[in-house]
């Protein structure tokens, strides 16, 4: 990815993507055609970006789906108390 964070949580998300090695970040004040070209070339030419992105996609696909989120919300509505995981336990 090539990301241009502007506002809200975008700067944090962009930083995390860069830290994870799945994106090049272009600061809003550095938006030039040459910056975009350089960042795109870096991402496309370095196979590590593709590998790390594929790994992230696999990790995300392994997460619980919408059905789990709905079940947690229904439980919260019915019990009126949040589900709290034990330290070190897998996500509910």
Image (cartoon, grey):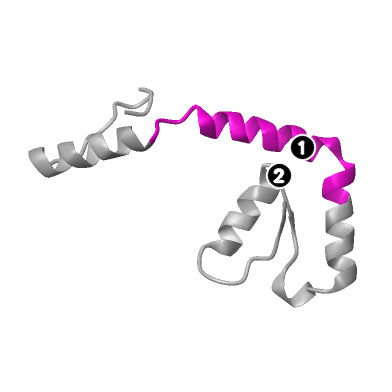
Q: Quadrant of the C terminus?
A: top left
Question: In screen coordinates, is 8 left or right of 11?
Answer: left
Of 2 and 87, the residue lying toward us: 2
Question: In screen coordinates, is 32 left or right of 90?
Answer: right
- CB within 8 Å, label 1 to label 2: no
In the image, what residue occupies the spot 65% across and 49% down?
17
Distance from disc 1 to disc 2, alpha carbons, whole Å, reads 8 Å
In the image, what residue occupies the spot 26% across and 39% down?
70
Would residue 55 be counted in the magenta stretch?
yes
Of 78 and 27, the residue lying toward us: 78
Would residue 6 be counted in the magenta stretch?
no
When the figure is inspected, residue 19 is found, relative to residue 50, above or below; the finding is below
Q: Residue furthest front?
A: 67
Of 80 and 33, the residue lying toward us: 33
Which residue position is annotated with label 1? 50
Which residue position is annotated with label 2? 22
Rendered location of residue 20, percent (x, y)? 67, 42
Q: Main secondary structure of the magenta part?
A: helix
Secondary element type, mark 2: loop
When the figure is inspected, residue 42 is found, relative to residue 89, above or below; the finding is below
Rendered location of residue 83, percent (x, y)? 22, 35
In the image, what residue occupies the spot 71% across and 44% down?
22
In the image, what residue occupies the spot 77% across and 37% down?
50
Q: Residue furthest left?
A: 79
> Considering only order in the chain, which callout, 2 or 1, is on the residue closer to the N terminus?
2
When the figure is inspected, residue 3 is found, relative to residue 55, above or below; the finding is below
Q: Callout 1: 10 Å neighbours few (<14), some, many (20+)?
A: some
Q: Callout 2: 10 Å neighbours few (<14), some, many (20+)?
A: many
Secondary element type, mark 1: helix
User: Which segment did they paint magenta?
Assistant: 42-65
């Amino acid at each position: 990815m090539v990301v241009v964070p502007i506002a809200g949580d975008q700067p944090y998300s962009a930083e995390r993507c860069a830290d994870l090695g799945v994106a090049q970040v272009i600061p809003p004040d550095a938006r030039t055609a040459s910056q975009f070209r350089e960042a795109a070339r870096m991402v496309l030419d370095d196979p590590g970006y593709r590998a790390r992105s594929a790994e992230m996609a696999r990790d995300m696909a392994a997460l619980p789906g919408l059905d789990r989120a709905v079940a947690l919300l229904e439980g919260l509505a019915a019990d009126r108390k949040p589900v709290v995981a034990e330290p070190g336990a897998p996500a509910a």
